[in-house]
Amino acid sequence: MKRTFAYLTTALGLVMAVGHANAADCEITVGMVMELTGPAGEYGQAGAKSVEMAFNDINEAGGVRGCDLVTDTRDSQSQGNVAVDSATQLVQVKKVPVIIGGIISSVSIPILTSVTGPAKVVQVSPASSSPTLTALGREGKTNGIFFRTITSDALQGVAAAKYAMDQGLTKLSIIYVNNDFGVNMFKEFSRAYEALGGEIVAETPYNEKQSSYQSEVTAALEGNPDALYLISYPIDGATIARSWISQGGPQKFLLNDGMNSPDFIESVGADYLNDAYGTSSGTNPTQSTEYFNANYEAFSGGIAPTNPAADRSYDAGAIVGLAIAAAGSEDPAAIRDAIYKVTDPEGEPIFAGKEEFEKALALIKDGKTIRYEGVIGPVSFDQYGDITGPFRLWKITDGSVETVGEMTTDDVAKLQSELE
């Protein structure tokens, strides 16, 4: 009896040890640094849920080499220094092969220059649109490890300028957030807008997280503008817009992509925003778009699939997960190269969702390339990790954002060449 009990005890211990080892071995951890709080908190919360949904779909399809993809998620608090600390822990302590994030450029850039670039760890941003990121690639400072699933603001600025002129907004004041994103968006827009014949009567940068922006609004109202171009985030943007309205500013607005936000509209008041226009990085709808729009809100616990960061964050997660599968390991260099293999224009088309990912994983196992056609459309990257794509033109009507048009990639490229 004693001998039998000893055997059983030993066997049970071995089973428990093996079970524990398998659980540890069968989780592949990807770092995620998202703006869960702070001015960009709305976007980061949506982005995190989107990545989790993509990983969940891949895991339900069988996972990566039989292992589950999981995230170690850190809150950047919408601050670059906090983001760098979080990314450093993920890379140096957790040894993650990939970081997804941040959402805003003022978070993604310091992560790239201080952490992922020097460590040669892959970084994929779902929504950082600053032209500085392209410049860093051209200067050889990214080690080819940075990718983003959003078009550059160099292109969005051109689209916004044309849209403003088409709406008769020919005399603008501009208030913009004083960070890399805001400065570059202002620069690119201004160049195109003035070339098209628009007049900028005031240009006012602001620093984030102030309780009042009355002095900035007062400065922006000089020159009697027809409208305000507000380059901001929902929380600060709402404070600025309310001050603009209360000080008698015209209730006409041009807004950047991040202001496409229910929170912004509710905070300002829908009645004041019926002449508010905006641009966003657009999509070429695919089967993935239909899948995402039908399933995201339930998965995320009520976040709308129209949140600016939601769709492209799912694609970032899907591309990272499929690339880890195609790399055959968690080696960052192999994952970097595999990103191009899973977005190969000549590969087998693959869409979002469990069934499609089952097909993708089988093709990868057979050594074949695939072309992930994402929620935002077919995704392909150039040597600097940039994508091209259309821009969505929208208007706020009775508290809802409505798409009223689109500028294609060719439209924007043609206009940009004409303005140079």
Image: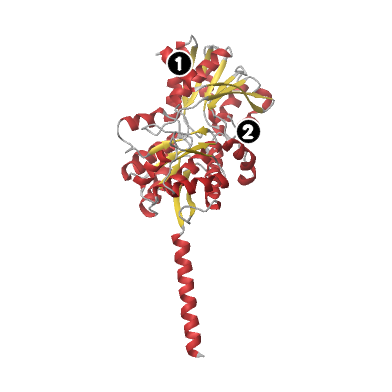
Residue 274 coordinates in the image, percent (x, y)? 66, 21
Residue 12 coordinates in the image, percent (x, y)? 49, 77
Is the C terminus in the top left, top right, bottom left or bottom right quadrant?
top left
Q: Nearer the viewer, residue 353 or 403?
A: 353
Residue 225 seen: no
Specify the quadrant of the image occupied by residue 308: top right
Residue 2 marker: none
Relative to 225, residue 314 above or below: below
Q: Nearer the viewer, residue 366 or 211?
A: 366
Relative to 411, residue 366 above or below: below
Residue 5 coordinates in the image, percent (x, y)? 50, 85
The 10 Å Cα crowd at callout 2, few under 14, some 14 to 19, many 20 or more, is some
Q: Earlier in the sequence, mark 2 or mark 1?
A: 2
Residue 262 marker: 2
Looking at the rendered structure, the kind of residue marked 1 is: Lys
Residue under the image location 53 percent in, 24 percent down = 230
The 10 Å Cα crowd at callout 1, few under 14, some 14 to 19, many 20 or more, is few
Specify the quadrant of the image occupied by residue 250: top right
User: Given the current orientation, which residue lies at the most extreme left position?
Assistant: 140
Mark whose residue sits in front, 2 or 1: 1
Residue 106 coordinates in the image, percent (x, y)? 43, 35
Specify the quadrant of the image occupied by residue 133: top left
Residue under the image location 44 percent in, 50 percent down = 365
The residue pinned by badge 1 equals: 414
Q: Secondary structure at mark 2?
A: helix
State the CA–CA distance, disc 2 to disc 1: 33 Å
Residue 174 seen: yes
Residue 283 appears left or right of 98:
right
